[in-house]
Image: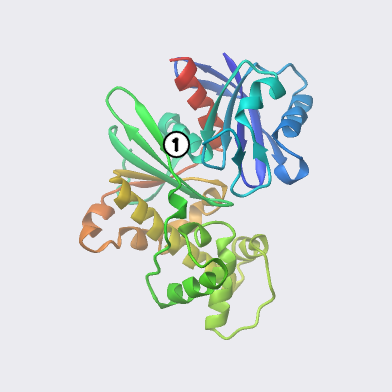
Amino acid sequence: MEVVSVDIGGTHARFAIAEVEGGRVVALGEPVTLKTADYAGFQTAWQAFSAQSGRTLPRFAAVAVASPISGDVIKLTNNSWVIRPPLFKERLDIDDFVLINDFGAVGQAVAQVDHQDFFHLCGPDVPFPEHGVLTVCGPGTGLGVAQVLRTAERYHVLETEGGHVDFAPLDAIEDRLTKRLRTNYTRVSAERVVSGPGIVAIYETLADLEHRTVPRLDDKAIWSAALDEGESLAVAALDRFCMSLGAVAGDLALAHGSNGVVIAGGLGLRLKDHIRKSGFAERFAAKGRFQARMAAIPVKLITYPQPGLFGAAAAFAQEHTR
């Protein structure tokens, strides 16, 4: 069975045609990436993908969106599109569909991709246990979080909004960072720090700490300065970002009772080599009386190139082809 797989994020909407059977994804076609800002909404982006594909689209859809899934109208957290699931069949000319949170889709991918699609970050360098809970989290435009519960019979993906828990500062620098963010947001969530845009406040806090005057830069410019140019203050912000990511991932693992953690998202993949050289591992394990337990948890990065698309198709396969 063929299905149009869609992954709608804060910045991009990705489309591909997948083949599914027996509850699993058999093949995922070449993805097409569209900027959400270039289209009025999901329907016009769907039509653009249809035109680019040069073929009649399958009459089934698997759609992952960066928002909680509830109600007849879904307003995406980090872009202006409004999704109306009750109108999908009419407006997209399809017979059936599955709608899933974007990090629920990543959780589906985590449950189905091969062992070689993971890169070891810290903890024991061993495969994930076959049973138990995996925490999946990833920084991008926001901070996505999901859980994968694996039993002897099957797996279950639990969609969450864990990226919106409170950020917990752990030292004087993060106290200053939190104070800076609180002037704009009142409540500082983990996503305000551990997401692509979060690097701006980190960078400006470090500049203020050193009494340096720096130009106002957006997050893309700071990430480029850190990863491509090696500019010292941007690199320091990158190191601090990785430390905070480790702390948040550890908090989530504790809260979920996890025996494995997966870092995902396009930004996570860009940080693949840097995370291991940063303070991520130390912050992940630094949980007081639970430090030994935390150090025993394998933490890996999913390297499959389109986990959201794969996972949306996997969710459809689980519901319709088991």
Task: Identify the residue under disc 1.
Answer: 107
Quarter the C terminus occupies: top left
Front-most of residues 112 and 72 = 72
Q: Residue at x 44, y 72 (%)?
A: 174
Above or below 277: residue 182: below
Front-most of residues 85 and 313 = 85
Front-most of residues 6 and 125 = 6
Q: Amino acid at mark 1?
A: Gly
Q: Where is residue 68 drawn, in percent x and y?
A: 51, 41
* Mark 1 crowdedness (10 Å alpha carbons): few <14, some 14-19, many ≥20: many
Q: Quadrant of residue 2?
A: top right
Q: Where is residue 228 drawn, in percent x and y?
A: 64, 61
Quarter the N terminus occupies: top right
- The reply to whether residue 210 is visible in this rendering is yes
Q: Residue at x 36, y 62 (%)?
A: 283
Q: Quadrant of residue 131?
A: top left
- The reply to whether residue 306 is visible in this rendering is no
Q: Where is residue 5 drawn, in percent x and y?
A: 60, 27
